[in-house]
Amino acid sequence: MIPAYIALGSNLGDPESQLRSAVGALQALSRCVLDQVSSVYRSAALGPGEQPDYLNAVVRLHTGLAPLALLDALQRIEQDQGRVRDTRWGPRTLDLDLLLYGREAITSQRLSIPHPRMLERHFVLYPLHEISGGDLLFPNGAKLETYLRQCPREGLVKSPRRLSARPGTHCQSH
């Protein structure tokens, strides 16, 4: 089983509920064990026009799925929760990004790991640090702590509430 880190984000349709539903859907994935869920973080939207703030979180699951199979599963969850892909960086019901897949570096037409913009995003790095600690190593051998020091936390608000999930839950094996 490979540890995979997934970023969750939402700014439409009751974002906190969207994130909770996504965690439930991740727990139900075949050949996976969800073992860590970060707190929820609020940040301003980065996309075009005026948008509501985003709620974000990061989860870690251990998976027996290949990277593209996991990506397909994430995109099905997004679609099931009403994700419409019409405006790049536009508002969305749910965004699931595969950040890291073990220590693998992958570059293909459909998938880049580590996620290409994760190092610029405080709403990814801080929840990632919360659930993994500073010793997390990237495929290039660098520690998460190194990138965290270069990414100010300004404008990122950590919620005292956590998503209701049952970390450590074994997912379905169908």
Image (cartoon, helix red, strand yellow):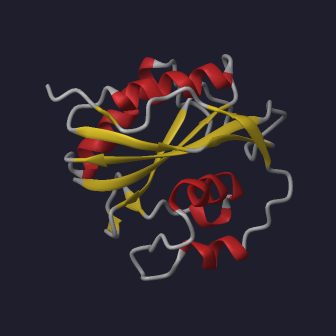
| Count of residue discs | 0
In the orientation shown, which residue stands out farthest toward the bottom? 141
Figure check: 116 above or below 24: below
Seen in the image, is 125 located left or right of residue 70?
right
Q: Residue at x 19, y 47 (%)?
A: 64
Q: Residue at x 21, y 50 (%)?
A: 66
Figure check: 109 above or below 170: below
Seen in the image, is 109 located left or right of residue 45?
left
Q: Where does the C terminus fall, quadrant-wise?
A: top left
Q: Nearer the viewer, residue 140 or 112?
A: 140
In the orientation shown, which residue stands out farthest toward the left? 174
Percent x, y of residue 94? 56, 29
The quadrant where residue 18 appears: top right
Percent x, y of residue 77? 40, 27
Q: Residue at x 66, y 64 (%)?
A: 120
Q: Nearer the viewer, residue 113 or 49?
A: 113
Percent x, y of residue 129? 59, 61
Q: Nearer the viewer, residue 103 or 44?
A: 103
Q: Residue at x 34, y 69 (%)?
A: 103
Percent x, y of residue 115? 48, 59
Q: Nearer the viewer, residue 123 or 105?
A: 123
